[in-house]
């Protein structure tokens, strides 16, 4: 991004950027970690003993931030501005929609403040709130066991029946802007959920059916229907599933610094230098440029977290390199799309969806990135193998000599500091131990005092800097905040940034606009969550499927009878979740694709013997995979715009290259120890107690894990070579299918079948590499139909 783009912006967009800068400033102050001494200093200056610089109370902070973000969305994605150019006769309607969304945002923020019991805005204005609090305080003095905190007065003045039309007006307007900013698929899903909930509520009201799937009970039978409906609508405003609930909290309090970090990275010179470094490291490999694309996309993608952004950022250099070295345009596009999508599963950042995973599973972020590590390594290793076999097949030679435009210069080495220092800052803070901060050389330099207790050296006193590090250690939000704080000055290592410092402001403003758009997306997700919760569909679906599986004895497939026992239950549910995640994810960003399926099928998977966390990781992987899955493979289509290839064929190539993204989730569903954390092997029993899955102790058996990873590597080798139809030499269709079958047997849980698979794999590889006669290569052009 350069300043040259600024003059081309409309007045509304410039105002949006200015407001976005304000949003970024406010958001970064809100998420600021505890800096030793700063809070005490602020309280001394203000004279307020409870004054806080950061971590503002959500009930007062969320409404104005919500209004600010929606104002930014209206100004940046104005219907009026677009239609004034495209269809002037409709410009007045566009203006009405823009003003309508602003009014709806104002009413939504106002409604939240009126309805939530911790504020009760109208009661505060009329004085009713003060009177009720005084009464509650007097009762707490005379009634034993009753505390004032336990008797928070409920709001007396509410919107009442007006909540219903207000809610559906807000939903309609916000959905229209979601279509404009994020596209139609998400709105179709959200609208379907809303219509289903409203329709089934009407069926219940008029007693038209007794089918539980067609009933949304608003309250007790025979009760006040309108009062119940009003309360349900109010819940959408103020409940944790509402649009100012947990998803607002994710955007404003958790993911905020990481979105800003990604925006700053996207405009830095470090991305190009990172690609040059990857080329330098892989220049002696036969698949050099493709390997470079994998490395750069993994590292860049873990920060940006967006597959399309990643493709367009790194692909503009890596794809031409691959084409120049002899790879087909479809394979080149497929590699870039698959690797860029994999950035979302690559620790330490993993993008916005990972923070949603943290919020929905209540598993700490440090454990989430630990769980994601081995599956991510397996995925990128499989892409490396795919490139290696394709390079052998296409007789692609190593580059050896680096093209002039990709040679590392002195400034490139300096630019790498811009990339690696913030990432190392995140890792240092996330993986650090609070108790050991100050024990090393840094502690000695910064004046930490230590003593020896029972043979162990401990820190007794730390200075302000060390205490600030302790406060941030182990906290993902603090790690992201400090990464941004470190990155901003580092950006000025780039001469272009020093020449035009306003580039940093533009990047920050674009980060604020992205956050506003992200919340618009999560608004639709929150509506899905709230209405699904009110409808009870998830619970009914789980009960129905579980009951069916308990009563079903046999599955008929292609004329064969398969007894439904143990693992078959799980495989059916996993396959269903996979298909739902891919279908619901088509054309959608990862976050709504993941949340939609997690809300629907997460409880079902957890009910069939998979841990709650593993079920969410399973769905998360397929939500990421939807970016490369035809017919709407957004990452592959972005790559096709660079290669000039046909989008659908590029999508198919991306699936072939990234096929392991579709198989890894099944592997860690069957072998949850790969996720390395206790939550992956912990389930809830019928009594509601947390217990370990049978056969697991909660501790990692490194020997068994090593053997499992060895089998996984062998299986990945067989799959990658089979899909390329090449290993040391070309292979027949029979050998290809045999390798795919053996790859499955190698990972089978039953020892006997696994042993057969290992023996068959050894025999296959010995035969291919030692005994098989080389098959003559086809003449030029014959292999092209096999190239995807």
Image (cartoon, helix red, strand yellow):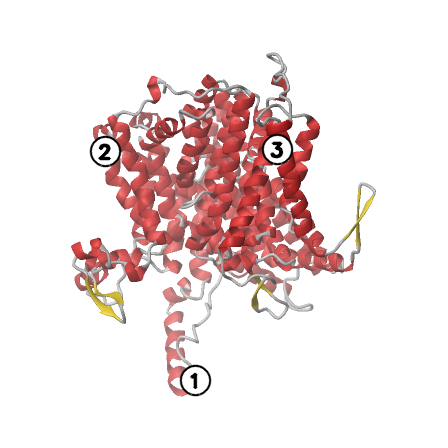
- Label 3 to label 1: alpha-carbon separation: 78 Å
Q: Which residue is mark 3?
A: 766
Residue 723 visible, this orientation: no
Q: Residues within 10 Å of mark 3 (few under 14, many from 20)?
A: few
Q: Is residue 629 left or right of residue 120?
A: right
- Picture quadrant where residue 785 is located: top right
Q: Is residue 187 above or below residue 272?
A: below
Residue 564 position, x and y percent, is: 76, 54
Q: Secondary structure at mark 2?
A: helix
Q: Are marks 2 and 1 in contact (CB under 8 Å)?
A: no
Q: Residue at x 27, y 25 (%)?
A: 409
State the mark number for residue 145: 1
- Label 3 to label 2: alpha-carbon separation: 54 Å
Where is the N terminus found, in terms of image quarters?
A: top left
Q: Is residue 283 above or below residue 28?
A: above
Q: Nearer the viewer, residue 672 or 125?
A: 672
Q: Which residue is mark 2?
A: 493
Q: Secondary structure at mark 3?
A: helix
Q: Nearer the viewer, residue 449 or 95?
A: 449
Q: Is residue 164 above or below residue 781?
A: below
Tag 1 or tag 3, which sits nearer the N-term? 1
Q: Nearer the viewer, mark 3 or mark 2?
A: 3
């Amino acid at each position: 991004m350069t300043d040259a783009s600024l003059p081309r912006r409309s007045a509304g967009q410039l105002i949006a950027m200015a407001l976005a800068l304000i949003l970024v400033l406010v958001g970064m102050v809100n998420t600021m970690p505890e800096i030793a001494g700063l809070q005490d200093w602020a309280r001394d200056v203000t004279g307020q003993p409870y004054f806080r610089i950061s971590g503002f109370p959500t009930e007062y902070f969320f409404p104005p931030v919500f209004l600010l973000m929606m104002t930014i969305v209206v100004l940046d994605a104005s219907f009026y501005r677009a239609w004034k150019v495209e269809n002037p006769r409709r410009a007045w309607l566009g203006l009405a929609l823009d003003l309508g969304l602003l009014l709806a945002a104002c009413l939504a923020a106002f409604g939240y403040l009126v309805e939530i019991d911790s504020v009760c805005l109208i009661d505060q204005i009329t004085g009713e709130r003060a009177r009720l609090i005084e009464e509650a305080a007097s009762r707490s003095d005379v009634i034993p066991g009753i505390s004032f905190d336990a008797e928070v007065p409920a709001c007396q003045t509410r919107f009442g029946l007006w909540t219903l039309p207000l809610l559906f007006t807000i939903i309609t307007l916000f959905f229209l802007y979601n279509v404009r900013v994020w596209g139609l698929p998400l709105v179709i899903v959200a609208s379907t959920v809303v219509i289903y909930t409203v329709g089934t509520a009407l069926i219940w009201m008029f007693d038209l059916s007794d089918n539980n799937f067609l009933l949304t009970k608003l309250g007790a039978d025979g009760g006040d229907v309108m009062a119940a409906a009003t309360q349900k609508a109010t819940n959408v405003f103020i409940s944790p599933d509402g649009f100012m609930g947990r998803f607002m909290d994710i955007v404003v309090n958790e993911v905020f610094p990481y979105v800003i970090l990604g925006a700053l990275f996207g405009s830095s010179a470090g991305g190009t230098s990172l690609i040059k470094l990857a080329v330098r490291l892989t220049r002696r490999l036969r698949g050099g440029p493709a390997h470079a694309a994998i490395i750069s996309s993994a590292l860049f993608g873990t920060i940006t977290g967006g597959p399309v952004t990643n493709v367009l950022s790194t692909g503009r250099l890596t794809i031409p390199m691959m084409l120049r070295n002899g790879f087909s345009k479809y394979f080149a596009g497929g590699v870039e799309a698959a690797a860029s999508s994999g950035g979302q599963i690559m620790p330490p950042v993993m993008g916005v969806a990972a923070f949603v995973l943290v919020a929905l599973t209540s598993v700490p972020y440090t454990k989430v990135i630990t769980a994601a590590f081995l599956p991510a390594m397996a995925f990128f290793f499989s892409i490396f193998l795919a490139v290696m076999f394709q390079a052998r097949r296409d007789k692609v030679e190593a580059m050896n000599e680096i093209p002039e435009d990709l040679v590392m210069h002195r400034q490139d080495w300096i630019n790498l500091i811009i990339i690696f220092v913030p990432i190392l800052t995140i890792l240092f803070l996330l993986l650090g131990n609070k108790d050991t901060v100050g024990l090393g050389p840094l502690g000695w330099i910064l004046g930490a005092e230590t003593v020896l207790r029972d043979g162990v050296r401990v820190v007794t006193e730390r200075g302000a800097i060390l205490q600030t590090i302790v406060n941030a250690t182990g906290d993902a939000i603090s790690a992201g905040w400090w990464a941004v704080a470190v990155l901003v000055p580092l950006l000025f290592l780039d001469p272009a940034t020093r020449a035009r410092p306003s580039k940093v402001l533009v990047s920050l403003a674009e980060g604020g606009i992205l956050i506003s758009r992200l919340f618009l997306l999560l608004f639709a997700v929150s509506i899905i969550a709230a209405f699904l919760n009110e409808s009870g569909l998830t619970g009914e679906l789980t009960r129905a499927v579980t009951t069916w599986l308990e009563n079903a004895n046999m599955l008929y497939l292609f004329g064969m009878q398969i007894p439904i026992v143990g693992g078959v239950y799980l495989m059916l549910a996993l396959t269903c979740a996979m298909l739902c995640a891919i279908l619901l994810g088509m054309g959608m960003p990862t976050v709504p694709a993941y949340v939609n399926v997690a809300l629907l099928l997460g409880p079902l998977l957890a009910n069939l013997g998979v841990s709650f966390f593993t079920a969410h990781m399973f769905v998360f992987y397929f939500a990421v995979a939807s970016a490369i899955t035809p017919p709407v493979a957004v990452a592959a289509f972005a790559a096709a715009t660079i290669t000039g290839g046909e989008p659908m064929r590029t999508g198919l190539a991306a699936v072939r290259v990234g096929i392991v993204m579709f198989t890894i989730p099944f592997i860690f569903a069957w072998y949850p120890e790969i996720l390395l954390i206790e939550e992956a092997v912990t389930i809830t029993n019928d009594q509601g107690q947390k217990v370990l899955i049978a056969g697991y102790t909660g501790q990692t058996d490194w020997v068994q894990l090593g053997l499992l990873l060895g089998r996984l590597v062998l299986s990945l080798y067989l799959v990658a070579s089979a899909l390329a139809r090449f290993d040391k030499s070309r292979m027949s269709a029979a050998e290809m299918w045999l390798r795919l079958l053996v790859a499955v047997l190698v990972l089978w849980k039953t020892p006997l079948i696994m042993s057969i698979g290992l023996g068959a794999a050894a025999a296959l590889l010995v035969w291919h590499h030692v005994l098989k006669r080389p098959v003559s290569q086809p003449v030029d052009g014959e292999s092209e139909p096999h190239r995807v």
